[in-house]
Amino acid sequence: QQQVKQSPQSLIVQKGGISIINCAYENTAFDYFPWYQQFPGKGPALLIAIRPDVSEKKEGRFTISFNKSAKQFSLHIMDSQPGDSATYFCAASMTGANNLFFGTGTRLTVIP
Amino acid sequence: KAGVTQTPRYLIKTRGQQVTLSCSPISGHRSVSWYQQTPGQGLQFLFEYFSETQRNKGNFPGRFSGRQFSNSRSEMNVSTLELGDSALYLCASSLGQTFGDEQFFGPGTRLTVL
């Protein structure tokens, strides 16, 4: 049973455009929601993370929007660049445990 | 500061064999978590060690085991390998003193079971 559902599976965006990736969860005990970026041959790297006490968090071109009532959160990449082409994973964990439940990943391709 | 290192990077084994993977966390990090990444199942949590004790365990069979040493280095062992164990095994380290602190991933060990 997938605890975190992620969509779309793949995404193609023009350079300068906005990339949007969505995730949904069921377990209301989740209270930490990170996004990871993974390049081929590399391990995932933390991009940005949010906790449910805020509805939005922005770091540079990356923004997380969080909707607690809908149990959904999304990643927005503004001014997408070819160097952003990678696989993105949303994840969730809960207080009392460090294990992350990952979404299935979104392969982003930014076309020059 | 050196990142998380994993050895070996690539490994080929045959069914029925056993394998040991190693992970050296970032200096000062006391928590080490292991994940399995496959195209079909994605990233799945195996277990977490903190101060030489297993603190959390995922839903994997007992063939998967691990341990952590006093210097926080961790090893993961898979016995009686099956074809389905072919995967990228990732290790992540964190300070571990509070839950939800940032986890830093290593590059992984690519295991192929023939």
Image (cartoon, coloured by chain):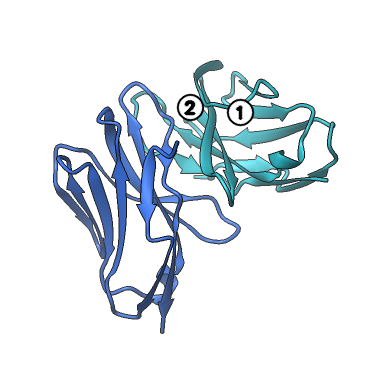
Chain colours: A blue, B cyan
Q: Label 2: which residue?
A: B31
Residue nearest the observer in this picture, B2 or A14: A14
Residue drawn at point x = 84 percent, y = 32 percent: B17
Farthest-out residue, front: A1
Residue drawn at point x = 59 percent, y = 52 percent: B39
Q: Residues within 10 Å of mark 1 (few under 14, many from 20)?
A: many
Q: Where is residue B48 in the image (x, y as percent from the top left)?
A: 51, 25
Residue drawn at point x = 55 percent, y = 44 percent: B41
Choose the circle earlier in sequence order: 1 or 2. Answer: 2
Instruction: Specify the amino acid type for callout 1.
Output: Arg
Examine the rendering and report whether any part of residue B16 can be seen: yes
Q: Where is residue B29 in the image (x, y as percent from the top left)?
A: 47, 30
Q: How crowded is mark 2: few (under 14 residues within 10 Å), some or many (20 or more)?
A: many
Instruction: Specify the amino acid type for callout 2.
Output: Ser
Question: Relative to residue A77, is residue B95 drawn left or right?
Answer: right
Mark 1 touches mark 2? (CB < 8 Å): no
Q: Where is residue A103 in the image (x, y as percent from the top left)?
A: 41, 47
Q: Distance between the residues labelled 1 and 2?
A: 9 Å
Residue drawn at point x = 32 percent, y = 28 percent: A94
Residue nearest the observer in this picture, A75 or A68: A68
The C terminus of chain A lies in which quarter of the figure?
Answer: bottom left
Q: Label 1: which residue?
A: B73
Q: In this view, does B82 lie above or below B52?
A: below
Residue nearest the observer in this picture, A92 or A58: A92
Q: Is there one chain holding both mark 1 and mark 2?
A: yes
Q: Label 2 lies in what chain?
A: B
Q: Quadrant of residue B96?
A: top left
